[in-house]
Image (cartoon, grey):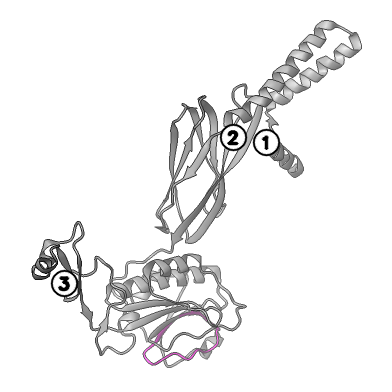
Amino acid sequence: MKFAARFTNWLEQRWVNPAYVGWVLLGLALFFFAAATNTLAGWLYVISGVMLALLMVAALLPPRNLQGLVVTRSPIQPVTACIPLAIELRVHNPQRQPKGLFQVIDSLPAALGPVQVTAVRTLPPGQTYTWRYEVPTQRRGIYRWPRVDLRTAAPLGLFWCRRSTEAPATAVVYPQVLTLKRCPLLDTVGPRDGQHWRYNPLAKADTQGITRSLRPYRWGDPTRLIHWRTSARYGELRVRELETITASCEVVIALNTTARWDETSFEQAVVAAASLYTYALKQGFTAALWLPSPAGQDNLLRESNRVMYALAEVAPAPIAQNVMIPPQQSTIWLTAAGTEAVNLPTGSRQIIWGSSSAAAALVSSLSTLRVDPNEPLETQLQVNVT
């Protein structure tokens, strides 16, 4: 059965594959031809010849119906888990003849969703058909698929023809970010003294605070930020870029991927890392994400897009070798029970998934939050730690 399916699929992609009606007509043509050779009846030869000619025409037309069609794909915007992906495909007909009665098939990865299919009734010359659809997402990940298939049996419906065209896609699904109203584990991390600049302020950054620099006016900038004295000197509008000072510290969210995780606990740990990172930024911390990697590589991520992308594709790696230890900064250590002790600086915190007697190997002097995978994670992250 599997061999037959592979063979028919090969026929459909390389040439044409007879439909059910096509197989029936082919069998009748062969039957009439065999009967004609036995009876030497001319009318049987005529019926057999007409059927074979019809089958030949029906086999040649479907590939021509798909010839020349151009498929392009719009970039897929990253989303957070549980938010649908918006996918857009465009089929353009540059030929002088109209095309129609064909299917557009987008073969999504099995982990993302089922195969998506739509039918195009007619596509006039020089026109473009736009297909938009949404795919629900359940869990994080980076999903890639290389092509789109066009399939038709037009105009007679006796033979199916499928042709693949390159339309590579990359869909990024970020982990879910929990809405934390409070997080004592992070609020009390590290020393609380000292002034620290907010890391990497954006161009639209703060609209209050001290002046960091002056830049040319851009469309949409508030007029109250225009520095009129400098604008008069240069003969063009100049706008103040402001920056605030936060009385906070830098915190590192460290996810220990080398521990022996079960699937449920690791997914919760990734959600916790994304939620803690987002909460830290909202509280004015300079936040960074640390993931184990081979020595010599920069594994401290600070930009939001890089952090979320790394958390979208991260996976457990319990056999990793030559793994660097977390940087000596205030750290929130996310790990599974039973891992070896790690030297963390004073003021750090740790979150442990699971329970094991080997958990005593962890640094016992640190404030610890033990997470029960069967309980809501959002509630557990907002409780006081010991």
Q: Is residue 179 magenta?
A: no
At mark 1, the secondary structure is helix
Crowdedness near tag 2: few (<14), some (14–19) or many (≥20) residues, C-alpha within 10 Å: many
Crowdedness near tag 1: few (<14), some (14–19) or many (≥20) residues, C-alpha within 10 Å: some
Q: Is residue 336 magenta?
A: yes
Q: Are marks 2 and 1 in contact (CB under 8 Å)?
A: yes
Question: In which quadrant is the N terminus drawn?
Answer: top right
Q: Could you tell which of marks 3 and 2 lies nearer the N-terminus?
A: 2
Range drawn in magenta: 334-350
Q: Could you tell which of marks 2 and 1 lies nearer the N-terminus?
A: 1
- 284 or 382: which is nearer to us? 284
User: Mark 3 or 2, which is nearer the eye?
Assistant: 3
User: Would you say the magenta stretch is mainly helix, strand or loop?
Assistant: loop
Q: Residue at x 32, y 75 (%)?
A: 280
Q: Amino acid at mark 2?
A: Arg
- 269 or 244: which is nearer to us? 244
Q: Residue at x 44, y 39 (%)?
A: 131
Q: Residue at x 70, y 24 (%)?
A: 22
Residue 248, given in percent of the width and then of the height, sits at 27, 83
Q: Which residue is mark 1?
A: 12
Quadrant of res 285? bottom left
**In the image, 368: left or right of 264?**
left
Q: Label 3, label 2: how many angstroms apart (C-alpha)?
A: 58 Å
In the rendered view, would you say 303 is above or below 47? below
Q: Could you tell which of marks 3 and 1 lies nearer the N-terminus?
A: 1
Residue 307, given in percent of the width and then of the height, sits at 42, 70
Question: In which quadrant is the C terminus drawn?
Answer: bottom left
